[in-house]
């Protein structure tokens, strides 16, 4: 046993080096959590997706519980990019982990415009392009469902920023490998696999949808096996790093994602149940590493053993 020995948790997600692989999933984290967790212990800080103009979001109810998960349709409630640059960026720059700005927009031009604005700040370390929000248009359509649109969008953003780009992919596609390849070819530095699964729930007593917007995105432990499969599939075809996102609630879940091919892992729904879940997950990763006499988390990435 090499208990107590130094464990390297530093990982590289496409030109952005993180002190450890654990970070919040966009939309599940905000300044109010400062009183419950030490932000400096996170691998990165990822606030909710921001849009060019303020948005009031979708009609309520916006969340509902499901078995081993939840459905949300917030509809990107947003204070707009100016407020973000004036308040959120200075607030998060007080902490040591890099700030990853998650961006959402209604058009490719608007994505490029907002990416250009955040690029002006040295306090923004990387851009996560949310091309996969299921709650913007009717029927859950998203930019990231079409390889050609994905390519064009990322190419246009690539032209206006030197910062690392993370394309957040949609799981609501027939072939996530095809979209991942389009994002890589367009110049994305890494991929986030993935956003929420388009879902729906009905109250059988009122016969009404449990979500005001009817459909929403499913997250939580229920989706983890689907996401593990997608990370594995994407890792087979791309060379750029993958950030896993979907249903992680323990250190072993995070390790599973890394074995499937993820270099880093986002935690979302689990933080709603236990606000300091990310710190517990980091401790559980240490325990796993000690148990398996490992000293470097990078030795886990893609190390699933098949056959
Ligand atoms: O705001 C939302 O409704 C939302 C977003 Br932007 C997203 O990317 N994923 C999600 O499940 N909800």
Image (spheres, rainbow, N blue to C red):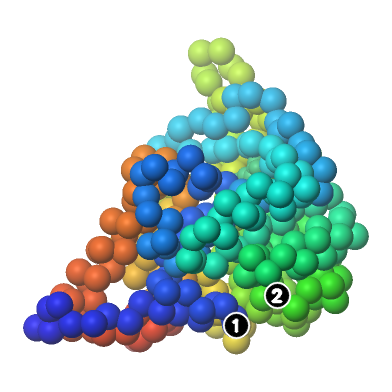
At 72% from the left and 53% from the top, the residue drawn is 85
> Looking at the image, is mark 1 or mark 2 earlier in the sequence?
1
Residue 162 to residue 26: above or below: below
Instruction: Tell me which corner region of the image, top left, top right, bottom left or bottom right, holds residue 117.
Output: bottom right
Q: Residue furthest right?
A: 109
Report helix, strand or loop for mark 2.
loop
Instruction: Tell me which corner region of the image, top left, top right, bottom left or bottom right, holds residue 300.
Output: bottom left
Q: Is residue 231 left or right of residue 40?
A: right
Report helix, strand or loop for mark 1.
loop
Total marks drawn? 2
Q: Indicate which quadrant contains ligand 1.
A: top right
Q: CA distance from mark 1 to mark 2?
A: 9 Å
Neighbours of disc 2 within 10 Å: few (<14), some (14-19), many (20+): some
Residue 111 to residue 271: above or below: below
Screen quadrant of the N terminus: bottom left
Numbered badge on residue 15: 1
Q: Residue furthest top?
A: 206
Residue 198 shows up from this direction: no
In percent of width and height, residue 14 lies at: 59, 81
Numbered badge on residue 168: none
Residue 36 to residue 289: above or below: above
Q: For this rendering, which residue is in front, 6 or 176? A: 6
At 43% from the left and 56% from the top, the residue drawn is 39
Instruction: Identify the residue position indicated by label 2 in the image.
Output: 163
Residue 72 to residue 202: above or below: below
């Amino acid at each position: 046993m090499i208990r107590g020995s130094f464990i390297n948790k530093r990982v590289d997600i496409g030109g952005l080096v993180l002190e450890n692989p654990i970070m919040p999933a966009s939309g599940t984290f905000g300044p109010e959590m400062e009183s419950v967790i030490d932000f400096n212990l996170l691998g990165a800080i990822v606030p909710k997706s921001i849009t060019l103009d303020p948005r009031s979001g979708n009609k309520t109810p916006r969340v509902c519980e499901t078995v081993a998960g939840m459905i949300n349709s917030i509809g990107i409630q947003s204070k707009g990019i100016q407020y973000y640059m004036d308040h959120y960026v200075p607030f998060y720059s007080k902490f040591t982990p890099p700030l990853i700005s998650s961006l959402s927009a209604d058009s490719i031009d608007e994505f490029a415009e907002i990416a250009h604005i955040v690029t002006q700040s040295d306090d923004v370390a990387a851009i996560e392009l949310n091309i996969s929000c299921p709650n913007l248009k009717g029927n859950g359509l998203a930019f990231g469902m079409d390889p050609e649109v994905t390519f064009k969008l990322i190419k246009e953003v690539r032209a206006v920023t030197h910062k690392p780009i993370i394309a957040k992919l949609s799981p609501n596609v027939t072939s996530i490998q095809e979209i991942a390849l389009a994002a890589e070819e367009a110049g994305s530095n890494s991929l986030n696999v993935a956003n929420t699964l388009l879902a729906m729930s009905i109250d059988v007593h009122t016969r009404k949808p449990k979500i005001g917007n009817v459909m929403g995105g499913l997250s939580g432990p229920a989706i983890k096996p689907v996401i593990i499969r997608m990370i594995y599939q994407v890792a087979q075809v791309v060379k750029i790093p993958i950030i896993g996102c979907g249903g992680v609630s323990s250190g072993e879940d995070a390790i599973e994602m890394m074995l499937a091919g993820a270099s880093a892992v986002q935690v979302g729904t689990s933080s709603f149940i236990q606000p300091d879940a990310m710190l517990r997950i980091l401790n559980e990763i240490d325990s796993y590493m000690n148990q398996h006499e490992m000293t470097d988390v990078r030795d886990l990435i893609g190390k699933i053993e098949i056959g």
